[in-house]
Amino acid sequence: MLRPWKLEIQLNTNTDKAIYLQIADAIIEAIKTGILSSGNALPGSRQLAGLLKVNRNTVIEALDILIAEGWLITIERKGTFVADILPLSTENTNQQQKTDLIKEEIQPLIVFDDGIPDSRIAPMNELARAYRQIFNRKSRWQIMGYSTEFGNLEFRKAIVQMLNFKRGMNITPDEICITRGSQMAMYLTANCLLAQGDYVMVENPGYKPAWETFENAGAQLLPVNIDKEGLLIEEVEEHLKNHQNIKAIYVTPHHQYPTTVTLSLKRRLKLVELSNQYNFTIIEDDYDNEFHFGQRPILPISSYSNAKNVIYIGTLSKIVAPALRIGYLVSNAENILKVGKHRKMIDVQGDNIMEEAVLQLINEGEIKRHLKRTTLIYKAKRDYFEMICNKHLKNKVTFIKPEGGLAFWIVPNPNINILEIADKLLLKGIKIITPEKFSFGKPISGFRLGYASLTEKQLEEGIIELAKYL
């Protein structure tokens, strides 16, 4: 019995496209538009060749392509049928590729970063002036010669004084190494402390660049969850009971990244106790200590007199500008010697001229005045951001007003696909950081919105658009 065939295929002999490809594409289009459905039988190759008035081998060639691509299946002694499970068409694939390219090419007008300071208010004129003065008053041989791998001594003394006076620490210049940003400090810490097979406990959610640095040094990661009081100490204890080679824990206790919560005093003390008991190092990343809007910032864990195993990492990039790559690493003198030895392998010294320029601004009181100005600006902007979030995101999200830092942690109501929202916002010229950027394993529900680098107008425009999709 002849099989029904209602599909009309118009073949064009005046085109470069081969006839068998025209037949194959016409059948694909019929399947996609529903003219042919899964399970429908196709005419035999002889019948189809007769209907189309082409050579049977041309039809067989077209059918072979459709079978190979998964559009058709053959059943022995029964014939050729439209497949039950259809492939993603080349057109759809190309469309997805085009969409991905469009997303990559979009230059968003509003970027909610992870808490970068506003470079427009950085003291660049003062820094440039100090930089020029260093050149003018120093002999050329003094400027261009090598200095120590630990950083300019006078600059180290200034940072030590700041840490001792403002952060309750008790260190000397031989217990600090100046680095090119906090990420270098993290790299040096990992490579001087860790070996293949060691374990490092990390906050989840947390700071992935640090995780990648630890893994690159050969360590394995053990995630510890976060609640409103910070690190869950019972999970830390559980890891310590179950693993022998735990060498360190990486924490951001002042304003946890990305959730902004502050580790409670009770948990800090317990963490120090466990560190001393099990002999693991607390790597404390105090990435935005300077911007605290409460009555008084909580002192670092590294300031506790009973904390025996600590490495403290800080940065000046948040104080002045992200492009200023000056960080520092604080630990005991023995660890600092190891850090200096490793640092010489990758970078003989830091930017001695920039260190002297920043030192001049510190001595002149310019850094102190700048911090006072920016703290007032960021506090006002934080309060404004809280207001517009309450206004436009009410009943759609939950968040806690952070006591410091330059970002908010926003948790949407359940069953919200943040990745889809991010894609839609990007097409509107707005970019947000999605949860997989700071989640261990399964993406956590929440996103971090930095507010410091945006204007009030940009902040409100971005939140209004975000509200439409929540």
Image (tube, rainbow, N blue to C red):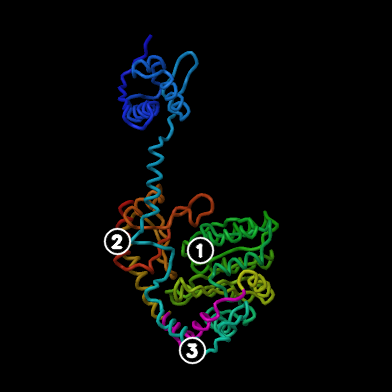
- The residue located at (55%, 89%) in the rendering is 139
Above/below status of 339 relative to 79 = below
Residue 353 belongs to the span the image colors magenta: yes
Name the disc covering residue 333, or none: none
* 3D distance between C-alphas at marks 3 and 1: 51 Å
Residue count near mark 1 (Cα–Cα under 10 Å), binned few <14, some 14–19, many ≥20:
some
- Identify the residue under disc 2: 461
Magenta: main secondary structure: helix
Q: Left of 3 or right of it: where is 248?
A: right
Percent coordinates x, y for residue 33 in the rendering: 32, 29
Percent coordinates x, y for residue 310 in the rendering: 63, 71
Q: Secondary structure at mark 1?
A: loop
**Sequence-wise first label, 1 or 2:** 1
Above/below status of 445 relative to 123 = above
Q: Quadrant of residue 281?
A: bottom right
- The residue located at (37%, 14%) in the rendering is 3
- Identify the residue under disc 3: 136
Q: Left of 103 or right of it: where is 440?
A: right
Q: Quadrant of residue 451?
A: bottom left
Which amino acid, mark 1? Answer: Glu
Residue count near mark 3 (Cα–Cα under 10 Å), binned few <14, some 14–19, many ≥20:
few
Percent coordinates x, y for residue 399 in the rendering: 40, 60
- Identify the residue under disc 1: 229
Q: Residue furthest top?
A: 1
Percent coordinates x, y for residue 199 in the rendering: 65, 58
> Over which residues does the magenta segment extend?
348-370
Q: Secondary structure at mark 3?
A: helix
